[in-house]
């Protein structure tokens, strides 16, 4: 039904695995990256439809990744996922389409991704 | 009137004035010394009066007149040795012998002046030179043995006595040898003597103020920092010492009132609190009656405690209540091994010191209240920090636990017979454990912070602690390299807590060390200390952060972004535990790269002859340091 590809960028392997499993069971196609640099690398393969982005990561953080993404001209929607209190503020900073604050549940995540992947017309 | 006559008049007026001053002093505060002073200046004033009246009435130079003057003058040396006896001590026989001698000299002068004037004059000169000279010397001695204002006054008295004796001798020589005229010199000498006596025996207020200043300054300089000194008993002992020094006394003691109970608390020689009923001792009497007490002979005033006073060489005790406005704080007493020479000055200083003591004790109270308030603020801020740190660091594992659990739930809903997802269950369990560890780390830190982590310290061999940690890692398939000394290295240790420190350091070394190079643990002895080093070959700690990494919630900047289960409390907890053991923890670079964390705590190689090991007395009582820090 959906052929939506989601790129999960987070330095915590358990978070990546959990989020992957949640999206897969909902029928999304997923790819993972451990930081911003890995994610940029993954873009070269195939462009995702949605990017789930942690903000604080080693090597290249969420801000750096978002800036580079826009610089390359991609307009892929980003969903910020962070444990920080100012999730909304950070999302606005990088012009993200949505955010989910950790700890998020199943429905929070799917809702956010769905909203971004299929914006109400 | 010539200049000499003027000087003579001024001198004589001063002597009479001094006589009146000491007489008034003796009447208001009678003491043997006061009356001896009256005797000295009374005799001189009498001589002045007799000669003046004789001149006024134009009496001829009658022999009986000269005899009277001689008799009067011969009293002076006798009065001086009596004063010397009051201030220090003269040989027992000297006073009666002196009394007989002065009568002899006087009667001789009275009776034989006309028949054998030369003999009388020589005897009188000898009397003055001998006894008077001895007194002047004794006054100088007393001056050098005393201090503060007493020293200044005694010095003036000594100078007065010396010049006075010299002047009298010169006057006799003048009269004896017609060839020389020493009149100008005698008049000047008499003036200097009376001024010196005035300064010594009845100093004006402004001179006293100037003399007191150094004593007070010394007391304040010694004691001002005590307002913020943590330990109340030590502060009291130091105030006592400062008071004794300011006084030049052998000792001082402060008794503190205890609210709601009729007792005074003192610090005894061993540094412990002792309580006595608030009317015990002369100090207690001064406290109860809220007045100064001067007990020249303490054993006589308070015979019940005579042996106590004797054993602390407190011949004389003077005590004054310490009060702040209307509140009775306690009592200050000063002990001296001999009676104070100038009581009014000592009382004045005592009261001033009592007032300063009150100020010090009150400001201590304020300082303590302030630090308690600050501690409360600190603890409030700490709680906030804990909350926000917890909120942030607990969120990541919580996300996994929540997500994974809901995922399992969904799967079950959709297909109850679907096989379990082993990887998901493992993630769930792993992150739940991580949550548990974070929570206990937070609680640990908070307990340590609040000082509630009771240290249960017992003698333990540090080698066995290292061994048990090594075994634990061995069971997990991690082989730590350890080096241990050949002999036992025993410290007073809370073993589970200390193992936690070592665990934490090894854990860090594994986490931040370089892959494939296992951490090393070394234990060795270093001047009464055990040194435990945990060596890794990792990225090291940036040089400007080596101190801060032991602060709470601090994480080195070069690890902050790396996957890290910690909350920034691990090293902080280590530091608190090590400090509670009376030790230190620090980090130094490992030669060739990496970090070496070093823990140093008091420990020693037990003496082999005795199989019973006991902690050296110098070690803090279990838990006392943690409690003092909190």
Image (cartoon, coloured by chain):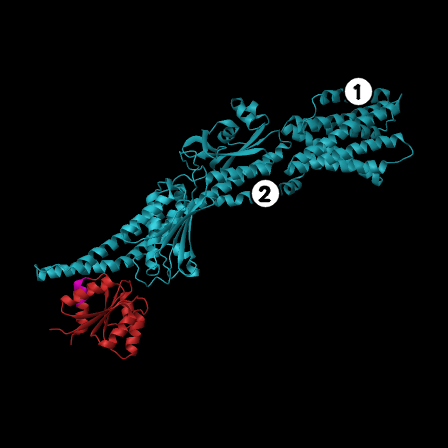
Helix, strand, or loop for circle 2?
A: helix
Task: Assign the C terminus of chain A to one quadrant of the image.
Answer: bottom left
Viewer-side residue, A24 vs B248:
A24
> Is B156 situated left or right of B490 in this image?
right
* Magenta stretch in the rendered image: A105-110
B474 and A32: which one is in front? B474
- Residue A106 part of the magenta segment: yes
Q: Quadrant of residue B3?
A: top right
Q: Is residue A112 above or below residue B52?
A: below
The tag on residue B104 is 1
Task: Provide the chain ID for the residue under circle 2.
Answer: B
Residue beneath disc 2:
B218
| Residue B402, numbered circle | none
Q: Quadrant of residue B165?
A: top right
Q: How many marks?
A: 2
**Residue B281 location, x and y as percent?**
51, 27
Chain drawn in red:
A
What shade has chain B been given?
A: cyan
Mark 1 / mark 2, whichever is N-terminal = 1
* Coordinates of residue B471 in the picture (x, y in percent): 30, 48
């Amino acid at each position: 039904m959906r052929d939506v590809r989601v790129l999960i960028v987070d330095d915590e392997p358990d978070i990546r695995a959990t989020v992957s499993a949640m999206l897969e069971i909902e029928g999304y196609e997923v790819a993972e990256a451990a930081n911003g640099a890995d994610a940029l690398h993954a873009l070269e393969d195939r462009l995702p439809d949605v990017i789930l982005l942690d903000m604080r990561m080693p090597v290249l953080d969420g801000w750096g990744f978002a800036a580079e993404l826009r610089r390359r001209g991609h307009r892929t929607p980003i969903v910020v996922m962070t444990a920080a209190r100012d999730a909304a503020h950070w999302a606005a900073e990088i012009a993200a389409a949505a955010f989910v604050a950790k700890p998020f549940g199943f429905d929070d995540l799917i809702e956010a991704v769905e909203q971004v992947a299929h914006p109400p017309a | 009137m010539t200049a000499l006559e003027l000087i003579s008049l001024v001198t004589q007026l001063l002597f009479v004035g001094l006589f009146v001053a000491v007489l008034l002093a003796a009447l208001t505060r009678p003491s043997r010394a006061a009356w001896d002073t009256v005797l000295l200046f009374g005799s001189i004033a009498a001589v002045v009066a007799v000669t003046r009246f004789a001149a006024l009435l134009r009496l001829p130079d009658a022999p009986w007149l000269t005899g009277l003057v001689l008799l009067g003058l011969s009293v002076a040396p006798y009065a001086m040795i009596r004063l010397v006896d009051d201030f220090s001590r003269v040989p027992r026989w000297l006073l009666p012998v002196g009394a007989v001698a002065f009568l002899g000299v006087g009667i001789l002068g009275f009776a034989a002046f006309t028949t054998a004037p030369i003999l009388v004059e020589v005897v009188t000169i000898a009397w003055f030179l001998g006894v008077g000279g001895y007194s002047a010397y004794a006054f100088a001695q007393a001056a050098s043995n005393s201090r503060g204002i007493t020293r200044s006054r005694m010095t003036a008295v000594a100078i007065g006595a010396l010049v006075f004796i010299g002047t009298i001798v010169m006057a006799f020589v003048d009269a004896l040898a017609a060839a020389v005229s020493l009149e100008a010199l005698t008049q000047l000498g008499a003036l200097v003597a009376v001024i010196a006596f005035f300064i010594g025996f009845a100093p004006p207020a402004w001179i006293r103020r100037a003399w007191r200043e150094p004593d007070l300054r010394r007391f304040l300089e010694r004691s001002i920092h005590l307002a913020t000194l943590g330990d109340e008993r030590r502060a009291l002992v130091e105030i006592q010492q400062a008071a004794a020094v300011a006084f030049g006394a052998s000792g001082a003691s402060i008794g503190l009132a205890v609210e709601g109970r009729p007792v005074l608390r003192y610090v005894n020689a061993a540094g412990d609190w002792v309580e006595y009923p608030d009317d015990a001792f002369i100090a207690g009497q001064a406290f109860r009656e809220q007045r100064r007490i001067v007990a020249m002979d303490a054993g006589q005033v308070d015979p019940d405690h005579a042996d106590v006073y004797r054993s602390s060489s407190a011949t004389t005790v003077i005590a004054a209540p310490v009060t702040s406005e209307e509140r009775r704080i306690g009592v200050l007493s000063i002990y001296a091994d001999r009676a104070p020479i100038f009581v009014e000055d000592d009382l004045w200083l005592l009261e001033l010191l009592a007032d300063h003591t009150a100020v010090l004790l009150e400001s201590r109270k304020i300082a303590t209240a302030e630090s308690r308030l600050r501690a409360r603020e600190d603890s409030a801020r700490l709680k906030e920090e804990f909350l926000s740190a917890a909120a942030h660091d607990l969120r990541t594992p919580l996300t996994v636990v929540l997500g994974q659990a809901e995922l399992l739930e969904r799967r079950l809903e959709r297909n109850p017979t679907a096989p379990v997802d082993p990887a998901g269950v493992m993630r769930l369990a792993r992150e739940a454990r991580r949550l548990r560890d974070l929570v206990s780390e937070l609680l640990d830190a908070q307990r340590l912070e609040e000082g509630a982590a009771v240290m249960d310290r017992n003698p333990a061999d540090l080698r066995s602690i290292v061994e048990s940690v090594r075994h634990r890692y061995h069971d997990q398939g991690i082989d730590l390299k350890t080096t241990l000394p050949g002999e036992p290295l025993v410290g007073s240790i809370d073993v589970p807590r200390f193992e936690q420190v070592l665990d934490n350091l090894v854990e860090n070394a594994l986490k931040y060390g370089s892959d494939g190079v296992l951490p090393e643990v070394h234990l060795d002895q270093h001047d009464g200390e055990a040194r435990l080093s945990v060596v890794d070959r990792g990225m090291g700690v940036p040089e400007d952060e080596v101190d801060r990494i032991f602060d709470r919630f601090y994480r080195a900047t070069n690890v902050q972004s790396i996957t890290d289960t910690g909350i920034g409390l691990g090293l902080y907890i280590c530091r608190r535990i090590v400090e509670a053991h009376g030790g230190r923890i620090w980090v130094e670079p490992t030669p060739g790269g990496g970090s070496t964390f070093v823990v140093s705590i008091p420990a020693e190689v037990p003496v082999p002859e005795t199989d019973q090991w006991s902690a050296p007395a110098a070690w803090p009582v279990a838990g006392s340091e943690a409690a003092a820090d909190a």
